[in-house]
Image (tube, rainbow, N blue to C red):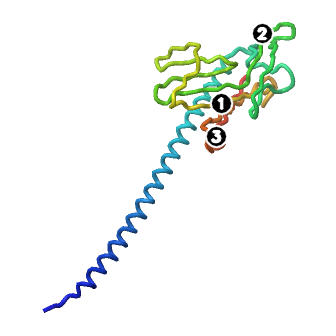
Amino acid sequence: MLIRNTKHDRGFSMIEAIVASAILATGLLAIAGLLANLASTTNYSRYTGTQTLLASEKLEDLNLLSACDPDIAVPAGSTSGSLTSDQSQTVNAQAGPPQICGSEVVNYFDDVQISSEAGAITETNNGVSIAQTPNGEVKTTAPPTSSDMLLFHRRWIIEKDQPIPGARRITVVVIARTGNALDQAATFQTTLVRQ
């Protein structure tokens, strides 16, 4: 007949339970860290994708303008606008030496708000907000105040005779306005060259 020491059996199962709990806790902490990292990466990707879209949209808008439009003219020197600060300039655009095409104050920056749930987009330039609803309707409006808004700031620079004489290089930078460290990390820049 086999005699068991019950004190020894109870102590061994308690140690097993502690070891199993420690292994389980370590695994759960690792999974929690992975989920937090996944959420951060997803948020960063969301901002980067939107920035790419907004930069491409601004380049397309500027590329569609005629050569004598003040918004893409470089009236003096070799550049208009800035990628590092908000700049405005009074521009007299000329098609040829005697012909003036237009004169206006040009802002080389704007703000864009995009609703992540409702799909509404609002661009604010020179104090005027233009909203586009998900069905494509465009109207002048006050900026939306929804809690799901993604906020972005765009700046652009137009360089004359770059990279070759007669060409214009347009560079747009889009900065995320999240209110945290993502602002520095989530900056997107792209360039277009046109004749």
Quadrant placement of the N terminus: bottom left
Residue placed under numbered mark 1 in the picture = 153
The image position of residue 11, as x and y in percent, is 30, 80
Q: Quadrant of residue 59?
A: top right
Determine crowd level at label 1: few under 14, some 14-19, many 20+ residues with C-alpha closer than 10 A: many
Label 1, secondary structure: give it.
strand
Label 3, secondary structure: give it.
helix
The image position of residue 112, as x and y in percent, is 61, 26
Measured in 3D between alpha carbons, the distance from the residue under mark 1 to the one under mark 2, in whole angstroms, is: 27 Å
Measured in 3D between alpha carbons, the distance from the residue under mark 3 to the one under mark 1, in whole angstroms, is: 10 Å
Please state which amino acid type lies under the numbered disc 2. Answer: Gly
Q: Is residue 187 left or right of residue 93?
A: left
Label 2, secondary structure: give it.
strand
Please state which amino acid type lies under the numbered disc 1. Answer: His
Q: 40 above or below 47?
A: below
Name the N-terminal-most of marks 2 and 3.
2
Residue placed under numbered mark 3 in the picture = 183
Residue 102's disc number: 2
Residue 77's disc number: none
